[in-house]
Image (cartoon, rainbow, N blue to C red):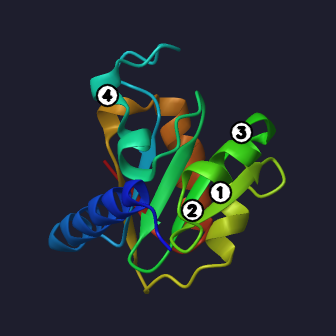
Amino acid sequence: MVSQQHETHNKRLKLLRAAIADAGLHGWIIGREDMYQGEEVPAGDERLAYLSGFTGSAGFAVVLADRAGLFSDGRYSLQMAAQTDPAIWQCCTLPDTTFEDWLKTVTLPEAAVIGVDGRLITVSLFRRIERSVLAAGANLVC
């Protein structure tokens, strides 16, 4: 049985997937960071928690048309599993399963495009993510 909280997050995920498709994208990356890159993120900027239910202080998600991966370090392995719907979210503990490793397990369309909000990540993080996305045969856009 899916909890009411999981249902709410699943509806939000469906809406995001529709927006991703409407934008002509094949995926979207959501981090926990806000535009100031501070450790404390205001409640109104908790995008990752809003979408997935995961409230840990570090992590990010990748949403594709048919899969969603949630990534955080070992401090949050149990919390990720407890706060998300296992039928929807594949929880990945870093560094055991990296973003690049996870991307290798998914099937992306040829010339797939994955988006990220460039206001919310640093240039160096964009470049790291871009390397992984390119290795999977896709492109990363802001």
Q: Nearer the viewer, residue 51 or 98?
A: 51
Q: Which residue is mark 3?
A: 76
Q: Which residue is mark 2?
A: 69
User: Taking 16 as reference, is 76 above or below it?
Assistant: above
State yes or no: discs 3 and 1 in contact (Cβ < 8 Å): no
Q: Could you say where residue 33 lies in the image, as x and y percent from the top left? A: 45, 28
Identity, as a three-letter code, of the amino acid under mark 2:
Gly
Q: Which residue is mark 1?
A: 99
State yes or no: discs 2 and 1 in contact (Cβ < 8 Å): yes
Q: Work out how far the residue at label 1 is from the one at label 4, CA to CA, in angstroms.
A: 23 Å
User: Taking 115 as reference, is 23 above or below it?
Assistant: below
Q: In the image, is 57 to the left or to the right of 17?
A: right
Check disc 4 and report its element: helix, strand or loop. Answer: helix
* Sooner in the amino-acid sequence: mark 1 or mark 4: 4
Q: Nearer the viewer, mark 3 or mark 4?
A: 3
Q: Residues within 10 Å of mark 4 (few under 14, many from 20)?
A: few
Q: Which residue is mark 4?
A: 45
